[in-house]
Amino acid sequence: MIRFCPKHKSSEKMLAELKKRLIKFKEKLEQSKKQKKRSGKRGIKKEGLQAVLVGFTQSGKSSIMKLLTNTNPAIDAYNFVTKELLLGALNYEGITMQVIDMPAINSEYCDFGIVNTADTLLIVVSSLREIDEIEKFISKTFGKRIIVFNKADKLTENEKRKIESYLKSRRYNFVIISALTGENINELKEKIVQSYDIIRVYSKEPGKNPSERPFVLPKSSIVMDVAKKIRIPETQIKEILIWGPSSKFPGQKVGLKHELKDKDIVEIRTK
Ligand SMILES: Nc1nc2c(ncn2[C@@H]2O[C@H](COP(=O)(O)OP(=O)(O)O)[C@@H](O)[C@H]2O)c(=O)[nH]1
Ligand SMILES: [Mg+2]
């Protein structure tokens, strides 16, 4: 429009206005370019089930990351060693989950875009007062929370009991572990799985052992959902037998609408 605007006295005002708008527009363009660069730097796509390790420096996040996943993060007695987040896969009983080792929650490197959207927060502490401190940083999160009290190897039995009863009284979902000795690491893995709204269901063929890998289904799934996963058409089904938490007795016969529970075993017999 500036180019086509007639250049004479009566259009001066209009031309000045247009030039002002052009400068503003260029500024905006520059800003949005910068923003794109910034957010593109650490674009990690959320895939499946995601847990993120949060806590202060030296609490043992990277040591736990190493135990949970196939990664090899830097672990040090220096503060703020982790400056970039690290992505790893946790394989547990046939389920694959994403775990993220996040730089210290109070450092500029902490990515709250990820912390705020994670399914599960692993709140790593080695003293009780850290919990309240961390909670100030995670008010905008919606993931389930697990307090991971680390460095249990440094505690006496008496200290452990006191910490346990405090955490119970606060109704925290917690686990007391040691990344050094590996104490309670499996309990931690189990708690991570249970924090997601999923159930594990094993299928079984007549006369055979249950499958090694479970089907991972949303909570309150029914037998029909498993039949769909195995691609057995409804009309082909003769009977359904069930073992595990949702059964009244081992090998109970149920219908397609039977609601499943975590760790159920289902046998679908066809005609
Ligand atoms: N005694 C003991 N030391 C630990 C444990 N976990 C981590 N540490 C030590 O604590 C320091 C910080 O560990 P690191 O995993 O780097 O913590 P981060 O800063 O939270 O990532 C290192 O010197 C570790 O060896 C544990 O369970 N017991
Ligand atoms: Mg670290």
Image (tube, grey):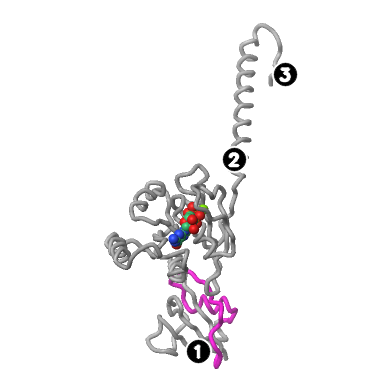
| Callout 1 amino acid | Glu
Question: Which residue occupies the foreground of this view, 165 or 212?
Answer: 165
Q: How far apart are marks 2 and 1 (CA)?
A: 57 Å
Q: Is residue 61 above or below residue 9?
A: below
| Residue 214 counted in the magenta span | yes
The numbered mark at residue 38 is 2
Question: Which residue occupies the foreground of this view, 174 or 259?
Answer: 174
Question: Which residue occupies the foreground of this view, 41 or 227?
Answer: 41
Nearer mark to the viewer, of 1 and 3:
1
Q: At x 59% / y 54%, what residue is drawn?
A: 45
Residue 4 spot, x, y in % from top left: 72, 18
| Disc with the residue nearer the chain's start (2 vs 3) | 3
Q: In which quarter of the image is the N terminus?
A: top right
Residue 35 placement: quadrant: top right
Residue 247 spot, x, y in % from top left: 40, 84
Nearer mark to the viewer, of 2 and 1:
2
Q: Is residue 120 visible?
A: no
Residue 60 spot, x, y in % from top left: 47, 57
Left or right of residue 26, residue 58 in this image = left
Q: Mark 3 points at which residue?
A: 4
| Disc with the residue nearer the chain's start (1 vs 3) | 3
| Callout 2 amino acid | Arg
Write the start and end of the magenta stretch as one range. Answer: 206-233
Q: At x 50% / y 71%, what residue is drawn?
A: 217
Q: Mark 1 points at which residue?
A: 239
Q: Is residue 43 visible?
A: yes
Q: In which quarter of the image is the C terminus?
A: bottom right
How many other residues sit within 10 Å of disc 3, few (<14), some (14-19) or many (≥20)?
A: few
Residue 121 spot, x, y in % from top left: 44, 57
